Each structure stands twice: as C-alpha cells, then as structure tokens.
Amino acid sequence: MLNRLRAVPGVLWTHIVPEIEKAAEYGRLGVVNMLIKCRKNLAISMVIGNSPIETTKFILDRCNVACVDLTIGLMWAKISNRIDVVKLIAEHSEVVSCKAYWATEILQIWFCVAAKEGSIEMVDALIHSPATQIHDALESAVLAKQLEVVERLLKVGSENQIGFLEYERSKPNRWTETNTIDTRQALQIAVGNNDFSMVELLLEHSSQAAIAKFC
C-alpha cells in the first residue's frame, strides 16, 4: 500500500507519515526499514518521536544519525511527553559522540529547563547522558530554588565523580583535578538569593576552593 502511495504523483513522504506511524505502532518494522533504506530522513525524524520505544531503537541502530534531524524527533517526543524516547536518544552512542550536534545542543537546553522547572522525571532521563553537563543544570535549578532537583544533581555528580579544576597554592601551576562537582557559580547564585537552605546543601558538596570563594 505504501509503495503504491509513494508512486502517486504529488504524494509526498510527509503525507503518508501518519500511515507509517500506524505501521510502526503495530510493530511493522519492515515499513520503517523501507524508510531507512530510501533515506527518507524527514519521515524517519517524525516517526522517531511518536513510535514505540522498540521502533525508535530499531531506527537509531540502523540509520546514520548524523543525517537524520533528531531535533524533530526530540520535539515530537517532548510534545507527547515521551520521556522514554528522549532518554534513549540522549544515551545513544552515535548521538553522544557528537555526530548529531544539534541534538546534543537541544538535550542540554532541555536539561537546564527541566532543572529550572523542577521536572525530576526529565532530569533523571537526561542526567546520565554524556551529551549533557550537570554544572549548567545545577545553576538553573539553584536560580529557580528547586531544592529537590539540586539535591538530585549533586548526588549523581558525586556518585559519578564529576571533576573540575581546583586552585591549590602548593602546586606549581596552582590547578589540579578533583572529584568534586563545581559548585562555585551555584553557590554565588544561592548567596545572592539569600537562599540559606540551598547554600547549606551546596556547601555539603563543595570543595575547599569553592568554599574559600566566600570566606
């Protein structure tokens, strides 16, 4: 049926995407595979955000994500509140290796927005992705006084030993790697907000360099 529709003059792939989505929903991966083989990247992008998680994984494992506009798929996934799809894309090896630059950019933006809005579910979906940076999300959450999100970010940051450069007077170059999450900017924001609960939480996870900034 889809092949016959494709042959009709004036019928674009975007016109039959709803039919493709239905086929994908029913597990007809052969239809989706036809899209991949034909390199219909716009159609693939639209299907990614609306399909069952198995279909999305099928697509990501078989197509060149550098050629597919994953931002479209991500937008559809977000509109549909498909956090499972967002998480899958965020952790896919091809995406996080920067072969899908715009996808990594939008994932980082959403990470900060989720932190600011206090969306724990979305934060958890993105927090382990190599495509996202905890420091920026931490500052967004502190600015919005999202204590629960800040606590979650600090916990994961500590568990994963996310490091930064710490100032040390005893070292010749005065900077050395640590396993402490960088809280300096976040502390400055919390102090400026007179948010004492936030300051206290941040101090528990701060290095000596970060604490010395306010002494």
Image (cartoon, rainbow, N blue to C red):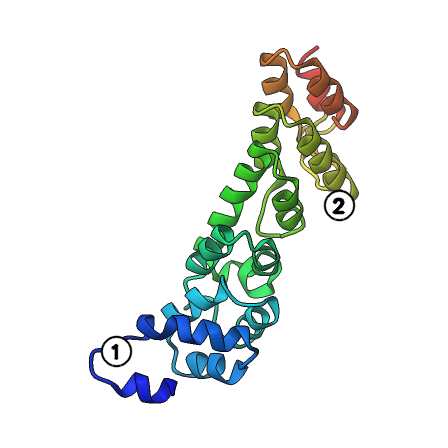
Q: Amino acid at mark 2?
A: Asn
Pick whichever of labels 1 and 2 is earlier in the sequence.
1
| Residue 104 in picture, x, y percent from top left | 50, 52
Which residue occupies 72% across, 17% down? 197
Which quadrant of the rendered structure holds the N terminus? bottom left
| Residue 102 in picture, x, y percent from top left | 43, 54
Real-space Cα separation, disc 1 to disc 2, in angstroms: 50 Å
Query: Which dot, 1 or 2, sits closer to the camera?
Result: 1
Closest to the observer, 26 or 153: 26
Q: Amino acid at mark 1?
A: Val
What residue sits right under mark 2 in the picture?
A: 160
Horizontally, residue 197 falls left or right of residue 16, namely right
Query: For residue 171, which numbered disc appears in the image?
Result: none
Depicted 115 relative to depicted 96: above or below:
above
Which residue occupies 57% across, 59% down? 85
Pointer 2: residues within 10 angstroms few (<14), some, or many (20+)?
Answer: few
What residue sits right under mark 1 in the picture?
A: 11
| Residue 21 in picture, x, y percent from top left | 46, 71
Which quadrant of the rendered structure holds the C terminus? top right
Horizontally, residue 108 falls left or right of residue 130, namely left
| Residue 11 in picture, x, y percent from top left | 25, 78
